[in-house]
Amino acid sequence: MISYSEILNILPFSLDRSEKTDLFNQRLGQLTAFHGENCDKYKKILDMLGFNADKMTDYYDIPFLPAGLFKEMELLSVARGEIFKTMTSSGTTGQAVSKIYLNKTTASNQQKTLVKIVSDFTGANRMPMLIIDSPSVIKERNMFSARGAGILGFSVFGADRTYALDEDMNLNIAAMEEFLEKQKGKNILLFGFTFMIWQYFYKELKKLNKKIDLSSGVLIHGGGWKKLINEAVSREKFKKRLKDVFGITRVHDYYGMVEQTGCIYMECEYGHLHASVFSDVITRRSIDFSPCSPGEAGIIQVLSLLPESYPGHSLLTEDKGIILGEDDCPCGRKGKYFEICGRIKNAEIRGCSDTYEKR
């Protein structure tokens, strides 16, 4: 199998369509064969579908697993004794959660991949970091929720990390003011989940009629938009309100999921989500799962070159999206770029950032 360490040497947005297709055909074919040999449940799925990885010529033909399958069964391709970390999705009360089993190699590669992708947007230097969440989220180190994993993953980009919320999800004004005074004149990194930022940071500061200057900040945020859409908050309105209250203009959304941690899709300066050389997106028609035409909305399939400890390299999500183009975004990054249109009908509300309930 082509080693992932070799792939990590490639710049994250440097391959054109032809070069990326060759890489994906090779690596994904090898991953499919590997998981078929080492995960009995995955092998049964391949056998049921009559798929032979050795005869694969196009990675578009690789069977996809519904992302929700990880809520229904344990899927791992290494000995259980090799698992040292379990990732969980953050389902709402009563929902089953996905469990993703990581060995040290896969977990390390996830972190390295995240660094490569995000550094393309923020630069290589670490910045003072304000985390718009509570420190209580990361207390359980051997089993991370999506929120905890996100905070830990992005923390590598920050120095002098400070939490904007206390253990009870209340604003920690004193900690924020001390942080901002100490970092005055420096670029700072802000990270949080979309709904948490809106509900527990922006709205609370607005209620207090308190403005803080974050004009030197770069905000990276992700997670579900479900509750914000219900409040009639669009991406444009979200950015405008943050600019009005905090003076912040550099805002990057990202799309990602616990089932493929590390391979996130960052929003560029033109508002487009980008697939890196480590991942890809395909949109499929719901009627027959055939690939959509350019500009046609469909169900999003995500592919990742990363997962070695579990068969998560080809997944069908519960999200709808449109591929806007490939290799020609005005930002100059190569690869596909796309937008999210929402959830497919009758899909569960995703947990992650948008389902926290204050107790």
Image (cartoon, helix red, strand yellow):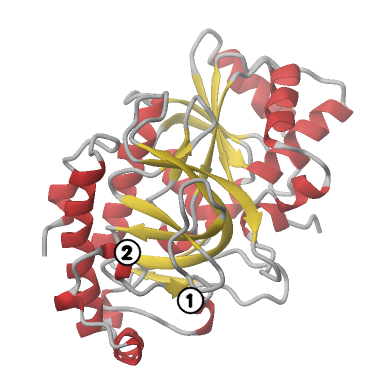
Query: Relative to residue 296, is residue 43 drawn left or right?
Result: left
Name the residue carrying label 2. 60
Q: Residue at x 28, y 67 (%)?
A: 103
Of the 4 image quadrants, the one containing the N terminus is bottom left
Residue situated in front as seen by the camera: 359 or 348? 348
Number of the front mark, 1 or 2: 2
Residue situated in front as seen by the camera: 238 or 109? 238
- Disc 2 marks a residue whose amino acid type is Tyr
Going by the picture, which residue comes out furthest to the top? Answer: 185
- Does residue 86 appear in this view? no
In x, y percent, where is residue 249? 60, 18
- Disc 1 marks a residue whose amino acid type is Phe
In x, y percent, where is residue 242? 70, 25
Name the residue carrying label 1. 70
Q: Earlier in the sequence, mark 1 or mark 2?
A: 2
* Real-space CA distance between mark 1 and mark 2, rounded to the nearest whole angstrom: 21 Å
Query: Relative to residue 288, is residue 234 drawn left or right?
Result: right
Label 2 sits on a secondary structure element that is helix
In x, y percent, where is residue 177? 67, 20
Label 1 sits on a secondary structure element that is helix
Disc 2 crowd, CA 10 A, few/some/many (<14, 14-19, 20+): some
